[in-house]
Amino acid sequence: MAKGLFKSGMIVSAMTMISRVMGLVRDAVVANLLGAGLAADVFLFANRIPNFLRRLFAEGAFAQAFVPVLSEIKEKHGDDDVRVFVAQAAGTLGTILLLVTFVGVVGSPIIAALFGTGWFIDWWQGGEDAEKFVLASGLLKLTFPYLFFVSLVALSGAVLNVYNRFAVAAFTPVLLNVSIISCAILLHDSFSVSAYALAVGVFVGGIVQLAFQLPFLYRLKMLRRPQFAWRSPQVTKVRKLMLPAMFGVSVSQINLLLDTVIASLLVTGSISWLYYSDRLIEFPLGLFGIGIATVILPALSKLHSGDKLEDFQNTLDWGVRFVLFLGFPAMMGLIAISPLIISVLFDHGAFSDSQVNHAQAVSYGVAAYSVGLVSFMLIKVLAPGFYARQDTKTPVRIGIMTMVLNMVFNIALAPFIGYIGLALATSLSASCNAYLLYRQLNKESVYRISSFTLMFAGKSILAALIMSVSVYYVISLYSWQTWPLVEQIILLSGLLVQAMAVYFSVMFALGVRLSTIKELRQ
């Protein structure tokens, strides 16, 4: 099972890497087209709302409630009952999503006013930023329907993951990025504001992703006519698990949305700086943290159904060890070389055509988010320790606590250091979230970090420190800010190779071998 988990994790990480690379290309196109000014702020705002709801309802609460129930039905009752359950879940979820999407499109001005408070106030008072509110309302009408399609994508992806078709679900987001890039290139001259072309890309991307997954469901014989089954015992069970999970698993997304609300009250560019900072953090988080979380939840659910408590704990410990192994170097590496990464990816076109140093502003945000990167990853591993046991109430209690903490940190830091304070507040609250999740798992005798993993963490920290110092020393030798893009790319590639070589060499010297990462027991 250990080798199977490791292999599946690597497959998901590989597919996710393709998706994240395409995501960075997409962000580079957005930065080149819109920069980090008014249009960028508004598009990123309009795109974040449906994406927030997607992570809250679909990939967040729904997936964490749906997968354990689906795994239980598969283990105890077989594929025929799974097919009935999937049809009922699809019909029920689809009906609800249609209603939510309709309300979202019709009520887009209200949503824009609710989450873009600063813009609405300016519009109400006839201020200079009034056009932001009007543009946000228009863009939301195009981006909001994405929620309907991508939520069904999350459902089909969960089914594919339970049947070990991890690569398909992990590759699917690539199609969204391709759609946005294609529409940005082909349609940007068709609108008076280029942001509309990107919004069309979001809409098309939702349709394309769902169409891509349907043939794979057909091969598994999981495509049946959807049924609205609100009172079905299995759907009812998912509903009851889903409600508290909406907060527990998606607290970081809620925090990011609250950051957006506050950022709309700050100087123009704050939302864009936070967005691009978050995107760089999402690369290693998606590549490693979400990759492992994707494979560990079905595995833990299966172990819980079979009452294999020792294997359950060993699997959690393996997940923690894996994210520490990759999380610490990612965190310290980003802090060391994020200015160069930002320059290569974003500092072109409209992004650089300004009196404001957007690249430097984003690098500060990356540093603040990086502080919490390991915590973000640990949450992705520790939260399934509850959801696999169909306990969604404990994470919601912890989630509410950390959400309140995040707002306290926001209020304490934002007045002094602006958007950087918002990013740092998110990192601090995530660290509190991870600690409280672990403390509760330990208290319930579900998981206690092994002494081996603690020693392993120390080795990872030491190796990551040596790696970051070596990389920072090399980058400080050059005045790369004035270099052409090609030369910056060559330098960045060389630094990444150097970082990997130093980190893995130090880990090897400290006695870490591949088997240390692959095996559950040590």
Image (spheres, rainbow, N blue to C red):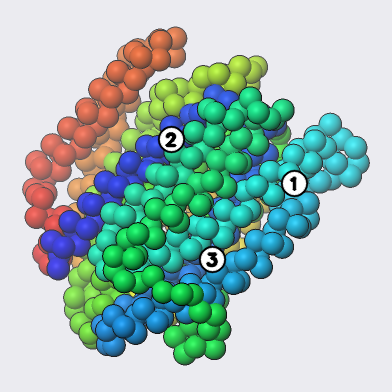
Front-most of 161 and 203? Answer: 203
The residue lying at 44 percent from left, 85 percent from top is 234
Task: Please report whichever mark, 2 or 3, sits nearer to the chain's N-terminal start.
Answer: 2
Label 2–label 3 contact, CB within 8 A: no
Work out how far the residue at label 2 is from the one at label 3, CA to CA, in angstroms: 25 Å
**Alpha-carbon neighbours of circle 2 within 10 Å: few (<14), some, or many (≥20)?**
many
- Looking at numbered disc 2 in the image, what kind of residue is underneath it? Leu
Q: Secondary structure at mark 3?
A: helix
Q: Is residue 240 visible?
A: no
* Residue underneath mark 1: 137
Q: Quadrant of the C terminus?
A: bottom left
Q: Secondary structure at mark 1?
A: helix
In-image side of 113 versus 212 (left or right): right
Which labelled disc corresponds to residue 57? 3
Residue 127: image location, x then y, percent: 87, 35
- Looking at numbered disc 1 in the image, what kind of residue is underneath it? Ser
In-image side of 384 versus 29 (left or right): left
Q: Secondary structure at mark 2?
A: helix
- Looking at numbered disc 3 in the image, what kind of residue is underneath it? Phe
Task: Please report whichever mark, 3 or 1, sits nearer to the chain's N-terminal start.
Answer: 3
**Alpha-carbon neighbours of circle 1 within 10 Å: few (<14), some, or many (≥20)?**
many
The residue lying at 14 percent from left, 57 percent from top is 518
* Residue underneath mark 2: 24
Task: Please report whichever mark, 1 or 2, sits nearer to the chain's N-terminal start.
Answer: 2
